[in-house]
Image (spheres, rainbow, N blue to C red):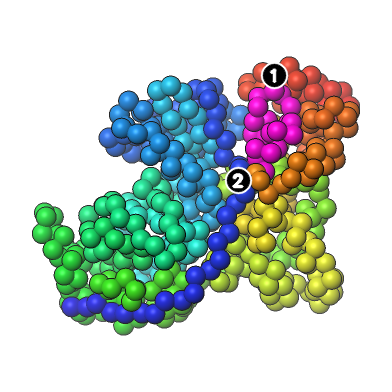
Amino acid sequence: MGCGSSTDAPQASQIASNVNVIIVKKKAVEEEYDIKGDEVLGEGTFATVANCTLKTTGEERAVKIIHKSRVNDVDDFRNELRIMRVLDHPHLMACYEVFETKTQLKFILEKLDGGSLLKRLPYSELNAQQVIIQICKGLAYLHDQKIMHRDLKCENIMFVKDDLSDFTIKLIDFGLSKKFKRGSTLHDFVGTPYTLAPEVMLEDYNEKADMWSLGVITYIMLTNRRPFPALDDSLYDQIDSCEYDIDGPWNSLKLSDNSKEFVKSLLTRDPKARPSAHDALKMPFLTTKHLERTNTNFDSLYSDMVAFSKYSELKKVGLMILAHQSKGLESMKNLRDAFEEIDKESTGVLSVQDFIGILEEHCTEESRDTMREVIADVYKQIDVNKANAISYTEFLASTLASYTALQENQLTQVFENLDRSGTGYITQADLSTVLGKQFSRKEIIKIVSQVDKNGDGKVDYSEFMALFREHIEEAGICQKVSSPNIKKEGIRESRASLFRES
């Protein structure tokens, strides 16, 4: 039997994204996506998840369809949107956009093809370690953002690819997630019974309840059985007593002492004695790594960042939106791996020190000397959110152009995302909505004026596309592309002008 202990580590500072990359569209999703109703990925009382395809690019995504008539309070699902708007991490599922009509709310989500953790049971310690490190990184980021998941279970951890050699995972389903105040507790009874922490049943808990759930998940992954196996109401008594068999399965399966101590520390009755996600990442079970290093060319990465730092502010914001929309693409894998290699403290954001450390480690002597002179300014220019830290999306945006060809239909989507008022132009009001309170009216006016060549106080389609002309030409695709979503006269006229100039 076991109930171990650990000490708490200081919490990392909160870094939230300010650029509003997720747009809510008041129209039918079918205008932009083909919904594959016969390819249902999951179905519950209130919602259905199905495959869908973006018409303009053919990219496959998932759609979560919430039927308003089946729910008591649609605001519960709007809370999920509020949570997902601030999440920006390699191991948290992305939400791209939302469509709302009178009867339905539809979330367009990253498509994850590999199934849940349950699909690959049981796991070797090495493979379990690979997965648990990613879970801990996702939880560390959530908890730094003062967000509890509150329904962490095997079914809510999905493999990205249907490839048994690829163990990349993402946490999903933030419907029960909730913001919390450091030092305070939550008091509502929510979650799935088999991963409930004892204090949740007492309706007085903090983010350490997620760590208990991770302990249950780790136990299941390594033993292919639940630590608290009851299938009736006696389950709650088993959890409350914190009595489970750890010696039997560990001895029979010849599992390591490090993995045993890891599970015991998490399945500890006293939340204060449980490790935080950051603490868990430092425990021997997870620090005995056998993970491959990335093949990232950091000299090239640094050059991309220097180029990005010199772009206009609107181009940077446009690339951030494109980066967010591209998170689920296979072409982003190398960048995701590079981000995690730089993020040595697993905060989910990058500091100046992170950059200096990794670039000095990997770059040539010549570029290293140059880097020291300009890194602080480059860092400041990449930090579009003004959060004194570089987010995952900012990092992707600053390096995106070297890893994927920018196509006009993708940039048209970005333009429409920025055109929040639906006028066919990007106005100062639109940018205020996208950029948030971090940018003053004076700064917004300056951003528009940098691009507004005809002086009408707004950005039309041709002015926006001109920002990306060099990237489109490099890709060899500077040609007129039909788009069924372009219906506004302002955009159509600008498109015609753009290609006459070409």
Specify the quadrant that holds the N terminus.
bottom left
Q: Residue at x 38, y 33 (%)?
A: 74
Where residue 262 appears, x then y in whole percent? 34, 76
Where residue 3 appears, x then y in whole percent? 24, 77
Where residue 12 appears, x then y in whole percent? 53, 68
Q: Residue at x 69, y 19 (%)?
A: 488
Residue most extreme to the bottom: 257
Q: Judging from the image, what secondary structure is the residue with disc 1 in? A: loop
Looking at the rendered structure, the kind of residue marked 1 is Lys
Tell me if I can see residue 499 in this picture: no
Residue 324 is marked as 2
Q: What distance separates the C-alpha of mark 2 from that of mark 1?
A: 25 Å
Name which of mark 2 and mark 1 comes first in the sequence: 2
Total number of numbered labels?
2
Q: Which residues are magenta?
A: 415-435
Residue 479 as seen in the image, left or right of residue 329:
right
